[in-house]
Amino acid sequence: MRNPSQWMVCCALTLTLVGCTTSEQPATNEPVEEPVVMEEPTAPEEAPESTDDASDTPEPEVAEEPPTEEEPPAETPETTPEEEAPRVELVPKEPLQTNGQANLALDTLILVNKQIALPSNYKPQDLVTPNIAFVDSATGDRRMLRQEAATGIEGLMAAAKSAGIDLKGTSAFRSYDYQVQLFNAYVARDGKEQAMKYSAPPGHSEHQTGLAIDVSSASVGYQLTQGLEQTKEGKWLADNAHKYGFIVRYQRAFEDETGYMYEPWHLRYIGVEHATNVKQMNVPFEQYLQQLMD
């Protein structure tokens, strides 16, 4: 009887061990599966929240580095801002004036007209005398321009000479005090209403910016006259001034907008790119600046 009892004991122990093993396996599988199920819905919810934190953003990116398919789309949008950046730089973000005073920060695009004035003590610091021919009556400061405008008028005069065009400067920079004397003389001669059509009140003259110059030719006796328009010199100026950064500031078609009569002799420097735009658009300088700022 010893052998059967021993055999029965062994069988009982074997069944007990088998029962314990089968009951533990499902218990270990259920906890393992639960975190996996919970992590899948949680991941998309946490992703948008982590985009606000700079420290959280690199972590998912590092985990997803192995797939190379995501890198090309990231490079494509980076090219577009680089191409558009220069366009933004070309647009000045400055007011044209503040309480009727010209915005000096606009530099060569500064706007001066009958409504917008320069400070009475304004005088550019970079005035130089360009290497061009002037009429004898132009002396001292009246031969000076700002450096950039001086370089532009030198190029214009050289090109004109090569084309057989005879031009001389008659008046460039004018101080506030000089404009007082000039304007008062015109008022005394023709009356204020008439003088206002061709001369600027003190502080409202473009000549005070150091960016304007009057030019004329021997064909009209070096006078400032609308007859210059009919000469080959006047026509050459109208067709070529923009190539050297100048515009014929007071056009016949824009007398109502500018408030001044047509002056084919009055050149205003604004730079080659802007001068070319103004000529192509065929608009007053005021309108061009307003569109540029908007």
Image: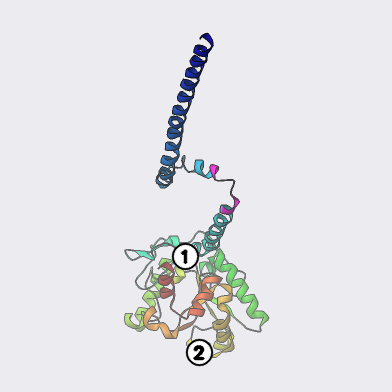
Tag of residue 279: none
Residue ID for mark 2: 227
Q: Which residue shows up at 57% across the image and 45% down it?
A: 65
Q: Is residue 135 visible?
A: no
Q: Which of the 4 image quadrants contains residue 35?
A: top left
Against 45, residue 276 (above or below) is below
Q: Position of residue 76 (x, y in %)?
A: 56, 59
Q: Amino acid at mark 2?
A: Gly
**Disc 2 and disc 1: Cα gap in Å?**
37 Å
Q: Which of the 4 image quadrants contains residue 258?
A: bottom left
Q: Amino acid at mark 1?
A: Val
Is 67 included in the stretch rendered in magenta? yes
Against 195, residue 269 (above or below) is above
Q: Residues within 10 Å of mark 1 (few under 14, many from 20)?
A: few
Q: Pick whichever, 226 or 223, lies toward us.
A: 226
**Highlighted range, magenta:** 62-69
Q: Pick whichever, 178 or 209, lies toward us.
A: 209
Quadrant for the C terminus in the image: bottom left
Against 79, residue 179 (above or below) is below
Residue ID for mark 1: 91
| Disc number lying in front (2 or 1) | 1
Q: Which of the 4 image quadrants contains residue 103?
A: bottom left
Q: Is residue 147 visible?
A: yes
Q: Is residue 282 left or right of residue 191?
A: right
Q: Pick whichever, 169 or 22, lies toward us.
A: 22
